[in-house]
Image (tube, grey):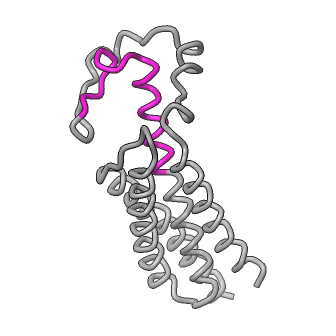
């Protein structure tokens, strides 16, 4: 019973961290001052990297090297946080229901709802902008997290059946 509650508690902690993070302005979260000190210049091979995300050109030339790096840190955080959330929900529900596939689907749907709510919350925060692209990225992270949890559940279940 303790493990079941532990996984679902982790999912709630993730939601709490998201709520706090979404209520902070961009300037309060900015890593650019730190990255400016740590990364004085871009490696030459990054000069050709250029793409568009949510209508914004992402490149070293357009943003500057510290902001370019920060973009990837922020997007990796989106992906990772939602992967952890979905993994925790899947593991918690699968332990309670013994239905890993169902738990994974519920986890991804819950992550989608939490991601949309998080972006809405950001729309209420000064200096933040909600992006549908971030909801898609969050959901991709959730798919990976739920997939890993489902694989983990199936593997553990298979071991139990062999004994």
| Above or below for 28 versus 65 | below
Q: Main secondary structure of the magenta part?
A: helix
Camera-side residue of 64 and 48: 64
Q: Residue at x 59, y 15 (%)?
A: 38
Does 31 sit left or right of 112 as displayed? right
Write down the region rendered in magenta.
Answer: 56-79
In the rendered image, the quadrant that contains the C terminus is bottom right
Q: Quadrant of residue 90?
A: bottom right
Q: How many marks?
A: 0
For this orientation, the residue located farthest to the right is: 2
| Above or below for 101 versus 53 | below
- Residue 140 x %, y %: 37, 58
User: Residue 103 lies in magenta, yes or no?
Assistant: no
- Residue 13 x %, y %: 65, 62
- Residue 59 x %, y %: 30, 23
Does 31 sit left or right of 65 as displayed? right
Q: Residue at x 57, y 71 (%)?
A: 152
In the rendered image, the quadrant that contains the N terminus is bottom right
Q: Quadrant of residue 44?
A: top left
Q: Quadrant of residue 155?
A: bottom right
Camera-side residue of 62 and 84: 62
Q: Residue at x 46, y 49 (%)?
A: 78
Camera-side residue of 4 and 160: 4
- Residue 91 x %, y %: 59, 75
Camera-side residue of 89 and 24: 24
User: Residue 72 lies in magenta, yes or no?
Assistant: yes
Q: Residue at x 49, y 58 (%)?
A: 82
């Amino acid at each position: 019973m303790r493990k079941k509650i532990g996984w679902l508690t982790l999912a709630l902690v993730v939601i709490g961290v998201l709520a706090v993070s979404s209520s902070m302005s961009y300037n309060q979260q900015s890593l650019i001052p730190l990255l400016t000190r740590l990364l004085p210049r871009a490696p030459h091979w990054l000069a050709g990297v250029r793409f568009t995300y949510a209508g914004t050109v992402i490149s070293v030339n357009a943003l500057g090297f510290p902001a370019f790096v920060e973009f990837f840190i922020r997007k990796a955080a989106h992906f990772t946080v939602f992967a952890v959330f979905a993994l925790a929900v899947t593991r918690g529900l699968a332990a309670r229901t013994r239905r890993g596939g169902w738990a994974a689907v519920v986890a991804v749907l819950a992550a989608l709802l939490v991601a949309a709510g998080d972006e809405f919350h950001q729309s209420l925060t000064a200096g933040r902008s909600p992006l549908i692209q971030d909801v898609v990225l969050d959901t991709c992270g959730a798919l990976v997290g739920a997939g890993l949890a489902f694989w983990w559940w199936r593997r553990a279940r298979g071991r139990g059946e062999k004994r």
